[in-house]
Amino acid sequence: MQQSHTPLSTWFWAAYLVTTHTPGMSAVQFQRQLGLRYETAFQILHKLRAGMVRPERDAIGAQYPVEVDETLVGGRTKGEGRGVHHKAIVVGAIEVRAPASDVDGKKHIKALYAGRLRLRVVPNRSSKTLTGFAQDNVVRGAVVRTDEWDGYDGLAKLGYAHEPIVLNGDGEKTDAHLPMIHIAFSNLKTWLLGTHHGVGQQHLQAYLNEFVFRFNRRFYPMTAFNSILGIAAHAAAPTYGTLYSGEWTHPIA
């Protein structure tokens, strides 16, 4: 916001809209709502996304099991042969919470729900990449549930209570063992296509950061508004030139 030619009131409106509008907002919607040039709307959104990653964020899984898995994000590739794609690999980790209520002195477990989420664009599915993601985002000693992919084999040696399972494409096993992360992936892809009509790989991490920010604060929209203003005031932000040249490296949620 500092040294910006855009009025401060516009920044506040932008922050309010992006944090409280349930499906999020595309740059085109932003442009229409605030009466801006498209380039200005695009830049404001990315500056706000740079303020959606709290530098001192803590690791997840201290109290709850964590599901970890990967997915492919991107459109179809035509005319390049069967099995060829240019999709991005996204790895995610999510807490599985089960709140308990005290009724007549007895604990009753309610339905499971998703806790905090982490998402990252990664170059491959190697053991170094996947275990590195876990180390960066999940508390050591946490219960970590994954599929049978050997990229996760090193988790137990790193101090995690690793619970892998062979899924073999079995939908029932997947729903039972990794329900929350697959719901998160599905919601992510629906949001990218529905609100943004797809995004390029160059800026995908920024959109993941927004999805994580909104997801983790979905029960407290006004807290999200206050958070983004506080973080963005101190976060480094991209210029229009660095966004389009590819020089800007998006922070990782």
Image (cartoon, rainbow, N blue to C red):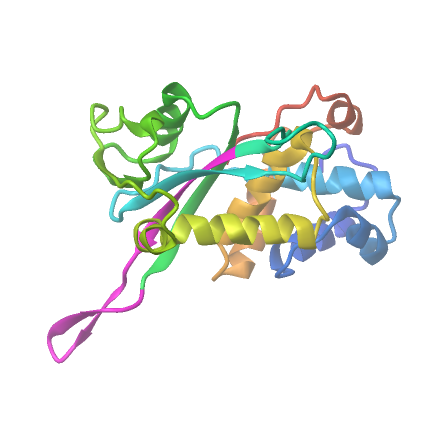
Image coords of residue 215 (percent x, y): 50, 52
Where is 201 relative to 207, above or below?
Answer: above
The answer to whether residue 56 is above or below residue 19 is: above
Q: Position of residue 90 (x, y in %)?
A: 51, 35
* Closer to us: 236 or 33: 33
Residue at (60, 46) in percent of width and height: 229
Give how far across and how far down residue 150 sits, in percent: 32, 27
Residue 227 visible somewhere in the drawing: no
For residue 34, above or below residue 106: above
Residue at position x 74%, y 31% from top? 79
Q: Is residue 110 above or below residue 241?
A: below
Asked whether, in this view, residue 228 is left or right of residue 174, the answer is: right
State left or right for residue 144 relative to residue 20: left
Write the residue at 64% across / 48% down: 192
Please state, as top left, top right, bottom left or bottom right, where the N terminus lies in the image. top right
Q: x%, y% of residue 212?
A: 51, 45
Residue at 74% across, 41% down: 44
For the record, the magenta segment spans 90-111
**Which image quadrant is residue 98 in?**
bottom left
